């Protein structure tokens, strides 16, 4: 199983809106596109005073990750949907993609 750990450094004062938009608009669209969202939300700690958020997603392979991501972020569902509301609140983003056992993905899933 492939786990993507994506972190976002957010523009000042935008954390609560970013997390809300992600939960209400972005995550449902990701899931409807077949992307497994494991967890998402705001960081409990503001690194160097910056608001931050995260998104954990699971894929069967690196190839599936690339294909699903390209399809989703190139779609009208994303571009005409929450794209601007999400992107306008991001100062920086970083992703790490790692291979993990299936049970590790389930352990990260929020109840």
Image: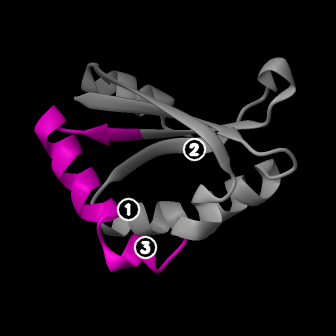
Say which element carries label 3. helix
- Where does residue 85 sit, x and y in percent of width and height? 64, 67
What mark, if any, has residue 40 been given in the picture? 2
- Where does residue 96 sit, x and y in percent of width and height? 40, 24
- Where does residue 37 sit, x and y in percent of width and height? 42, 48
Q: Name the residue under label 3.
A: 79
The residue sitting at 34% across, 50% down in the picture is: 36
Instruction: Check contact, mark 3 vs mark 1: CB within 8 A.
Output: no
Instruction: Check contact, mark 2 vs mark 3: CB within 8 A.
Output: no
Alpha-carbon span between mark 1 and mark 2:
13 Å
Instruction: Please name which of the two marks, 2 or 3, marks the residue nearer to the observer.
Output: 3
Q: Is residue 70 above or below residue 12?
A: below
Tell me: 57 left or right of 69: right
Mark sitting earlier along the chain (3/1): 1
Q: Name the residue under label 1.
A: 31
- Where does residue 40 sit, x and y in percent of width and height? 57, 44
Say which element carries label 2. strand
Q: Is residue 60 above or below residue 102?
A: below
Say which element carries label 1. helix
Magenta segment, principal secondary structure?
A: helix
Tell me: 49 left or right of 109: right
Please tell me which residue lies in front, 78 or 28: 78
């Amino acid at each position: 199983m492939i786990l993507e750990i994506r972190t976002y450094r957010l523009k000042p004062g935008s954390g609560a809106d970013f997390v809300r938009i992600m939960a209400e608009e972005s995550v449902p669209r990701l899931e409807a596109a077949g992307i497994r969202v494991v967890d998402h939300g705001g960081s409990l700690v503001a690194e160097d005073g910056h608001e931050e958020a995260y998104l954990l997603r699971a894929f069967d392979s690196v190839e599936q990750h690339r294909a699903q991501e390209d399809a989703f972020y190139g779609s009208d569902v994303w571009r005409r949907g929450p794209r601007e509301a999400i992107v306008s609140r991001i100062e920086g983003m970083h992703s790490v993609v790692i291979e993990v056992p299936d049970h590790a993905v389930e352990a990260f899933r929020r109840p």
